[in-house]
Image (cartoon, grey):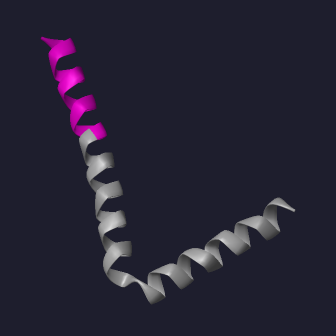
């Protein structure tokens, strides 16, 4: 059941990207910016920890 649900979600994501590429790219950019911020904050934490 999990595998089938995973395929359905993947197909829906591909369909959404195909029909709405502009908003989909904004969502992807937002997610990427979020990950970048997390890693930037980890770097600041480790730098401050070492001082």
Which quadrant of the figure has residue 28? bottom left
Q: Position of residue 1 (x, y in %)?
A: 87, 62
Seen at 71% across and 66% down, the residue is: 6
Outermost residue toward the bottom in this view: 19
Q: Report the residue at 50% width, 80% height from top.
A: 16
Q: Quadrant of residue 5?
A: bottom right
* Residue segment shown in magenta: 38-51
10 and 49: which is toward the camera: 10
Seen at 26% across and 53% down, the residue is 33
Specify whether 5 is left or right of 29: right
**Spot occupied by residue 27 in the image (x, y as percentages of width and height):** 36, 64
Q: Residue 31, image x and y in percent?
A: 35, 55
Q: Is residue 44 above or below residue 17?
A: above
- Residue 18 covered by magenta stretch: no
Residue 9 as seen in the image, left or right of residue 31: right
Q: Is residue 43 above or below residue 22?
A: above
Left or right side of 37 for 35: right
Residue at position x 12%, y 11% from top? 51
Magenta-highlighted stretch: main secondary structure? helix
In the image, residue 43 lies in the stretch drawn in magenta: yes
């Amino acid at each position: 059941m999990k595998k089938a649900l995973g395929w359905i979600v993947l197909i829906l994501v591909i369909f959404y990207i195909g029909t709405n590429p502009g908003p989909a790219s904004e969502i992807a950019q937002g997610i990427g910016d979020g990950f970048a911020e997390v890693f930037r904050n980890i770097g600041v934490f480790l730098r401050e920890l070492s001082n």
